[in-house]
């Protein structure tokens, strides 16, 4: 490991690495990825094991605390999270300031950022107790905020959290329940929702997490930092990809049109890319995509949508791409977003909510990474250098002398 700090201060040298492909911004003990082998582990546990045997609350605890909880710790943590699910009532009126057709991600950026205006006490980043409360508040309130963003967009009344339900069940109910009608939670759907949250919980120094860390490195409060992460996640090259995958599948429309789109994805004269394919770190199958594909089949079977044409189209697209020389030589495999949109649509979420769900799940990862950074005594403000390519010094021209 080269100490870049010394390179610059002692030799006036710095590394030029657009996109930070080989620049480590931090040391972290939270998440490990081996992109060549397609391995993802949180605190030493494989994502496949966590998705199969654990649940989202345990994974949250693991990411934040470093260990899986015992029964007492799990009960206490769950209690803390459910205790903090409510929002201050004034936040409900805050929603009315948004246009009714606002994208729910725009609402998320605004409302999560505004939490710092409602919960001043936990903006003190130097107090470990307040850091913990801020973490609980964010993990607990983000699903409430997300469900309210959905309700607002469809013109239905907000549904308040119900604390006898688990995290995924509560979220589904806040999103889909309507007054005067009983909302029945489908256990297969609730399990799939929980698994989707696990699969998206953390992914080391991706763009949104790095955004959270950079924002936090200045001492900004956690609510502002997570709002910055949500804003970054929104982009189609990052969390917006699940929405883009579904639009792409709709655009392709039928199996016979796949070769045309594969051809476009390979062409250097066309900006089109196969959405849900490729990853900066994985040069092998994204292990989250494998679990997501299994879940996709389970959910569609349970909902009686086994013959969903989009699933058949996605599977055929994957098959053709994985046999194509371009995708093989570029090591482009399906990523986590490739199948998630199909499950989410089958559950009933509109595409505009897909990235919101990613944000709900990733909040714990952002919070864990933010806390790890704040608690690291070697932490300093994030400040990349640049390679200046502009003019050298030149004389100032008064307005009447300029062409
Ligand atoms: N379709 C076609 N070609 C692709 C794709 C794709 N999806 N992804 C990468 N490539 C090609 C590029 O054209 C480039 O080809 P070249 O070397 O011949 O010029 C090569 O693969 C490397 O691509 P880069 O853009 O340099 O790779 P980078 O690591 O910067 O990008 C990214 C990774 C953004 C994920 C990219 O693969 C992509 O745009 N994928 C589609 C969007 C997507 O699915 N994003 C979700 C990411 S996962 C997540 O956020 C949870």
Image (cartoon, rainbow, N blue to C red):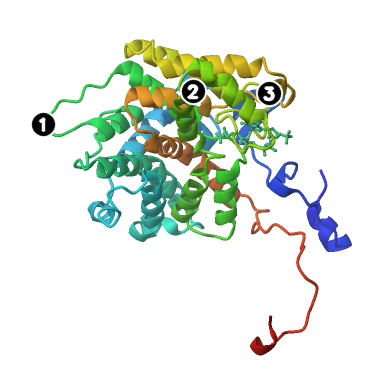
Mark 3 vs mark 1: in front? 3
The residue lying toward the viewer, choosing from 58 and 198, is 198
Residue at x-position 42% and y-position 49%? 134
Mark 3 lies on residue: 327
Question: CA–CA distance between discs 2 and 3?
Answer: 18 Å
Q: Quadrant of the C terminus?
A: bottom right
Question: CA–CA distance between discs 3 and 1?
Answer: 51 Å
What is the secondary structure assignment of the residue under circle 1?
Answer: loop
Question: Tag on residue 260?
Answer: none
- Indicate yes or no: mark 3 CB to ligand 1 under 8 Å: yes
- N-terminal label among 2 and 1: 1
Mark 2 vs mark 3: in front? 3
Horizontal and vertical percent position of residue 283:
69, 26
Mark 2 lies on residue: 339
Mark 1 lies on residue: 180
Q: Examine the image and state in which quarter residue 31 appears.
A: top right
How many neighbours does mark 2 have within 10 angstroms: few (below 14), some (14-19), or many (20 or more)? many
């Amino acid at each position: 490991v080269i100490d870049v700090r010394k390179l610059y201060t002692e030799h006036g040298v710095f590394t030029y690495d657009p996109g930070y492909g080989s620049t480590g911004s931090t040391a972290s003990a939270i998440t490990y990825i081996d992109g060549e082998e397609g391995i993802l582990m949180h605190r030493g546990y494989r994502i496949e094991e966590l998705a199969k045997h654990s649940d989202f609350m345990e994974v949250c605890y693991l990411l934040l605390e470093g260990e899986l909880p015992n029964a007492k710790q799990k009960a206490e943590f769950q209690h803390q999270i459910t205790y903090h699910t409510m929002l201050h009532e004034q936040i409900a009126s805050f929603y009315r300031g948004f246009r009714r057709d606002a994208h729910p991600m725009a609402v998320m950026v605004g409302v999560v950022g505004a939490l710092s205006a409602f919960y001043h006490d936990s903006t003190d980043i130097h107090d470990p107790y307040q850091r913990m409360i801020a973490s609980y508040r964010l993990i607990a309130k983000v699903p409430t905020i997300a469900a309210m963003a959905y309700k607002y967009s469809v013109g239905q009344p907000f549904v308040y959290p119900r604390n006898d339900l688990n995290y995924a069940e509560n979220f589904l109910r806040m999103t889909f329940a309507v007054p005067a009608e009983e909302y029945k939670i489908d256990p297969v759907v609730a399990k799939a929702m929980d698994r989707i949250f696990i699969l998206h919980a953390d992914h080391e120094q991706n763009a949104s997490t790095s955004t959270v860390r950079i924002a936090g490195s200045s001492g900004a409060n956690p609510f502002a930092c997570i709002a910055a992460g949500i804003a970054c996640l929104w982009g189609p090259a990052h969390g917006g990809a699940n929405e883009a995958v579904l639009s792409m599948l709709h655009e392709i429309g039928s199996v016979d049109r796949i070769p045309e789109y594969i051809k476009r994805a390979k062409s250097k004269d066309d900006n089109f890319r196969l959405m849900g394919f490729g990853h900066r770190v994985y040069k092998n199958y994204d292990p989250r995509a494998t679990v997501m594909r299994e879940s996709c089949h389970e959910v569609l079977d349970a909902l009686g949508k086994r013959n969903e044409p989009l699933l058949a189209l996605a599977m055929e697209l994957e098959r053709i791409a994985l046999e194509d020389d371009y995708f093989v030589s570029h090591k482009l495999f399906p990523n986590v977003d490739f199948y998630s949109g199909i499950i989410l649509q089958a559950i009933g979420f509109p595409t505009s909510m897909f990235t919101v769900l990613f944000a709900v799940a990733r909040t714990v990862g952002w919070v864990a990474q933010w806390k790890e950074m704040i608690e690291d005594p070697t932490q300093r403000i994030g400040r990349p250098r640049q390679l200046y390519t502009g003019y050298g010094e030149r004389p100032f021209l008064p307005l009447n002398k300029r062409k």
